[in-house]
Image (cartoon, rainbow, N blue to C red):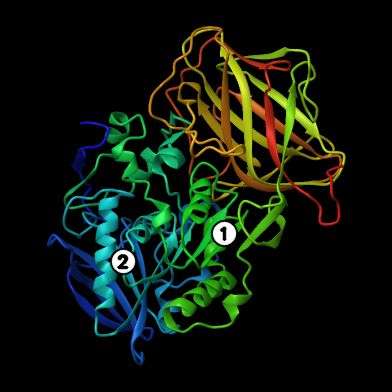
Amino acid sequence: MTQDAFEYRFKPGTSPDTLLKVPFGYAKTLADGMVIERDVAVAMRDGVKIYIDLFRSENAKGKLPTVIAWSPYGKSAPKGGYERFENNGGVKAEWISKYAAFETPDPLYWTRQGYAFINADARGMWNSEGDATFWSADEARDFYDLIEWSAAQTWSNGKVGAAGVSYFAIVQWQVAALQPPHLAAINPWEGYSDSYRERARHGGMPEISFMPHWLAGNCYSRGRVEDVMAMIDEHPFFDAYWKSKAPDLSKIICPAYVVASWADQGLHTRGTLEGYKQMSSKHKWLEVHGRRKWEYYMRPDNVEKQRIFFDHFLKAPGDEISKWPKVNLEVRERFYVGAMRAESGWPLARTRYTPLHIDAAASTLVKAPLAAEGALRYPAADGRALLEHRFDADTELTGHMKLKLWVSTTEGDDMDLFIIVDKLDAAGKVVPFCYFSVFEDGPVALGWLRVSHRELDPKRSTPYQPWLLHRRELRLKPNEVVPVEIEILASSTLFRRGESLRLTVQGRETYKPKQRGPEMKHGPLRNRGEHVIHAGGKYDSHLLVPVIPPEKAELMA
């Protein structure tokens, strides 16, 4: 196939019979004040039927707006909810009813607020007909058809919203870019928007743990499912296959309440922020927190914010949403210590991008460039370079960081670079942050690069955010020195006077979980010999940091 076309690979799905909690087939029941219709068949444009569960209040009066959650996870037979994770992922049992599926709105709450709620099984998943694809443009067309079907029902007021976390958010980017006429608003809550860059190949390196684990537990189908791992192997570069999983975000015009997290580095942080930045919606809000994603989504005060948003665009405009700041973000100090602050846009317009130059001799990051050339060397397999910068005044870093390096390897023809930014307290101890949904000892921010993938897109790259083309490999020769620019994912952290930023550059994984939860790994790696970082003189190796000026100060001390 050419770069402009691709053919899906499929494999048999896993039978859902052992997990189904109720017999398949249409059924209508009354329970807890709701009319519940299970296994409602909805025909797609090609005649394939998908199945949904529909919830409405039995005392509903008049036409209802609809909220839809779409995924492959199983509307009627979830394999398990938040109890799979350490401390239920922070979700308290009293926050949700028995009707709430994983990462979705709770039907009991929403029907009581005057909404119809639909939980859908995507094409090819569980009992829905057809072949399943994931995070795809094909899936978005089905979601489009369901939106238009629901808007045409006799009980509907013609206004539809889309909601949910992670997968439920990823597909919102896809369907909103198609502009269904009756999609009135979306609430993408932590979902990546570019499967290649944000999930499958960080910096060009294949991710080999989280995705296989996800696939092993989420391919319940009576038909065929996309063979994702085979497709990843067949499509190492950003081609038509990956374009189909990265919608044109500029085509999103519907109102959006977007929620991102500094804590989901390597999965949803980048893509959610890019969705907000690139969408064309006239009415859009961004909230960025540093907490556990599921806890933050299900927290009762945040559920009320979701209701206020959907009420405004699916029912009748109110005054409360006019008080919301366009951007509301948490400036973190450590795990679960931080303060929310209102802003007018993202990235922050007043950011002062400040280079911290690498002093190879002292293993520090300094404000002034060095005239003398130097080098840092470490064994590629198990070594690392550590560089610190101590702040002499309280300093807030909020936004994108970029690491510019000149690098070489003594052996082999490629390098895999793993980047960690940590905060150290005044005593030099690592300060922990929430990480990857559930962990309590994570870093400030992460970055990755396979050096053969260093080619930049000159149109999309900015001085503070490099954008890699991922169209070909540029292999190295031993001891060949090349410049690289590494995107470090966005974050927000307050460093107090006497505290330090520590930058780690190494050739292996950055984080090993100490708790029960998802894990991210990369490989096979291409490191051999020693990695060398060249700095000083003609080698302008530096870390570019986003300094936010104090409200009453003009310059950083």
Q: What percent of the width, then of the height, locates residue 285?
A: 55, 64
- Quadrant of residue 418 within the rendered picture: top right
Identify the disc placed on residue 375.
none
Quadrant in which the C terminus appears? top right
Q: Which mark is residue 90?
A: 1
Mark 2 or mark 1: name the one nearer the start of the chain: 1
Which element carries disc 2, helix, strand or loop? loop
Above or below — where is 306 with respect to 122?
below
Which dot, 2 or 1, sits closer to the camera? 2
Q: Residue 162: where, in percent of width, then height?
A: 39, 67
The residue nearer to you, when weighing 427 against 318, is 318
Q: Residue 333: x percent and y percent? A: 74, 50
Residue at 67% in and 52% down:
349
Residue 53: x and y in percent read: 28, 71
Contact (Cβ within 8 Å) of mark 2 with mark 1:
no
**Residue pictured at 53% horizontal, 37% vertical:** 461
Outermost residue toward the front in this view: 459
Q: Amino acid at mark 2?
A: Pro
Q: Quadrant of the N terminus?
A: top left
Graded by Cα atoms within 10 Å as few (under 14), some (14 to 19) or many (20 or more), the crowding at tag 2 reads some
Q: Is residue 444 left or right of residue 180?
A: right
**Viewer-nearest residue: 379 or 412:** 412
Name the residue located 54 percent from the left edge and 9 percent from the top edge: 480
Residue at 36% across / 34% down in the picture?
A: 238
Write down the residue under mark 2.
180
